[in-house]
Amino acid sequence: TQLLEQSPQFLSIQEGENLTVYCNSSSVFSSLQWYRQEPGEGPVLLVTVVTGGEVKKLKRLTFQFGDARKDSSLHITAAQPGDTGLYLCAGNFGNEKLTFGTGTRLTIIP
Amino acid sequence: NAGVTQTPKFRILKIGQSMTLQCTQDMNHNYMYWYRQDPGMGLKLIYYSVGAGITDKGEVPNGYNVSRSTTEDFPLRLELAAPSQTSVYFCASSRDRGELREKLFFGSGTQLSVL
């Protein structure tokens, strides 16, 4: 069973600060997705990365896929209260199953 | 834009009771999924369907049943509720296989407690 480890599990920072959260595995991903989930709602897709070393930007969010395709990071610049939520990574290990990580619960303090 | 609609939003069951969680989507998606989300755990796939009349087991199917008589609807049935089934349940759909980088659209979830 492939495992996705996300770190940190919890993160609470002040508005305006920068942060990075991580998604790691011992196995190679075919592709990886990042989702954000707000309380009482289902996850919403933010981005899909496919190529090793790939970097994608979504406004203040920067997503990077590791060169070896075993890890990914999400960097948020100048965090805002609207960024608060549970960030989930979901990886495809090439076995036709999507595996979700346990998530990073992010709180931005105004 | 309704997207994926789940009902009910909340439910409390007694041990041994049965219930059906409803899920419908209006995007004409072929693929539909049921996940459960436990505190501190990732989403676990219960069952999925690749089209009307076709269903298959996911990672944690025991204690659940599904059917897919139409493209739009994918209900999840709990026959004999157990405390271990206390969780938040999410239905999702995708145009193509979610495992192949396709975007999953999620409903807003059903919070189920079995006491």
Image (spheres, coloured by chain):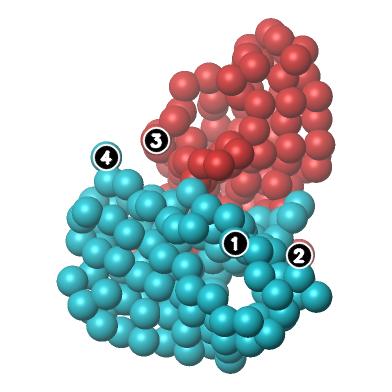
* Residue kind at label 2, given as amino acid type: Ala
Q: Secondary structure at mark 1?
A: strand
Q: Is residue B55 left or right of residue B84?
A: left
Residue at mark 1 shares a chain with residue at mark 4: yes
* Circle 1 chain: A
Q: Secondary structure at mark 2?
A: loop
Q: Is residue B99 left or right of residue B61?
A: left
Residue at mark 3 shares a chain with residue at mark 1: no
Within 10 Å of disc 3 (Cα), the crowding (few <14, some 14-19, many 20+) is few
List the residue tagged with mark 1: A11
Q: Position of residue B38 (x, y in %)?
A: 58, 37
* Circle 4 chain: A
Which mark's residue is nearer the viewer, 1 or 4?
Answer: 1
List the residue tagged with mark 4: A1
Q: Is residue B37 left or right of residue A6?
A: right
Kindly indicate whether the residue at mark 1 contacts the one at mark 3 (C-beta within 8 angstroms).
no
Give the chain coloured cyan: A
| Residue B2 marker | 2
* Residue kind at label 1, given as amino acid type: Leu
* Residue kind at label 4, given as amino acid type: Thr
Give the chain coloured red: B
